[in-house]
Amino acid sequence: MAAVVLRSVTKQFGLSPVLRDIDLEVADGELVVLVGPSGCGKSTLLRVIAGLEELTHGSIEIAGRRVDGLPPQERSVAMMFQSYALYPHMTAYQNMAFGLSLARYDRAEIARRVHHAAERLQISALLDRKPAELSGGQRQRVALGRAIVRDPAVFLLDEPLSNLDAGLRARTRLELAKLHRELGATILYVTHDQLEAMTLGQRLVVLREGRVEQVGTPLEIYRLPRNVFVAGFIGSPAMNFLDASVVSADVREVLCKLEGGALVRAAVNGTPLHRDERVTVGVRPEHLHQTSDPEAPLHGNVTVAEVVGEACYAYLEIAGARDGFVVARLDADTPVRAGTALQLHAPPERVHVFDAAGDALERSGMRRS
């Protein structure tokens, strides 16, 4: 396996930039997940690394060798597509062996590699079946086996679980995590599923409009988002945002006044701010707690209450909320329904503040990735 290094990677289609000066280093054996909204360039980045799209500017190194001028077959990468791209007229064995046959491996070596991969993926009994005779999960494993037999330096996986139902998706996600540990493989993984991203990725790369917004561990990005975009994109339900103005600010704390007049404290370094400056206050649903204090900063009547397993998501219409409402994650046993009056507060260490440009203020002693 091998490290992947991207330097100023840029891709344009005509005059339209899709990737903009991307710098990224993926360590040998690391599983890095690319996330972002549709059209942000996730799949294009994989295709550029694989050599399926020509680079407009920049460089790509794999295992210390520059590969952006090489054809796909010489880059030592294996790409797995969302559709699996299996040949319908071939058996599972033939699909897995096809690339090795093109590379002119002898039959004995092909058989050894295919059977070894099939054993690891628990599909040995399926090798004589054609794709139409396989379930979605089985086809996914065959496609993954086709990548494994090539023994590539890097695996590029483009939404490999998106065609599976929820139950099979969860099981296959666990199998992928186990396989990564066993192979010690370097993997770049694209997904739109936040659960996949947060559980599989050793690091996340958050993309927007072809640019890298933030790179870090899932927990770092969740707890210390760099800006409003990352804060709103990572997390489900999304972070609540409220318009506010600065009452006071120092190195330890910012006191903000919400549109309704209530005061909220945030344990962040407020030295870049000035009194009356407009800011955005952010707080995640699970960090809002019910209180009996009538002076609580967030209060209103519940418009919708959704009970999902052990959680109840209460939606309140609150002045200044960016989406028109604030959502709180409460215990499912909390007696809440439409029309219930709630008072909510958040601990200052759980409150985020973003300046007028949308950038997050740092917590004292804590640095964002």
Image (cartoon, rainbow, N blue to C red):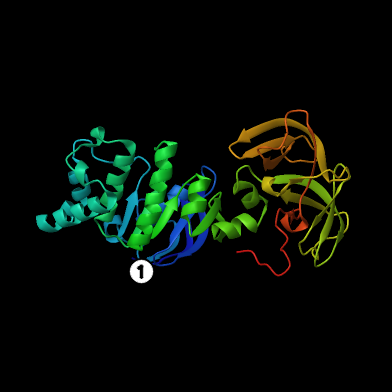
Give coordinates of residue 136: x percent, y percent. 33, 37
Inspect the image, locate mark 1, and give the three-letter code of the amino acid beneath it.
Answer: Ala
Q: Is residue 319 visible?
A: no
Which residue is pictured at 26% across the width and 36% down the height?
Answer: 134
Give coordinates of residue 71: x percent, y percent. 29, 57
Kind of element beneath mark 1: loop
In-image side of 356 versus 124 (left or right): right
Location of the N terminus by quadrant is: bottom left
Residue bearing mark 1: 63
In-image side of 33 versus 221 (left or right): left
As rendered, which of 335 and 203 lies closer to the eye? 335
Instruction: Kindly indicate the quadrant of the structure image that contains residue 61.
Output: bottom left
Against 340, is 54 above or below? below
As rendered, which of 248 and 171 lies closer to the eye? 171
Instruction: Kindly indicate the quadrant of the structure image that contains residue 268.
Output: bottom right
Give coordinates of residue 24: x percent, y percent. 49, 63
Which residue is pictured at 48% across the width and 48% down the height?
Answer: 196
Give coordinates of residue 192: x percent, y percent. 50, 44
Which residue is pictured at 88% across the width and 58% down the height?
Answer: 275
Residue with the most extreme left position:
107
The residue carrying pointer 1 sits among few (fewer than 14), some (14 to 19) or many (20 or more) residues within 10 Å by Cα, namely some
Q: Is residue 286 visible?
A: yes
In-image side of 162 versus 312 (left or right): left
Instruction: Kindly indicate the quadrant of the structure image that contains residue 265.
Output: bottom right
- The number of numbered discs placed on residues in the rendered structure image is 1
Location of the C terminus by quadrant is: bottom right
Residue with the most extreme front position:
333
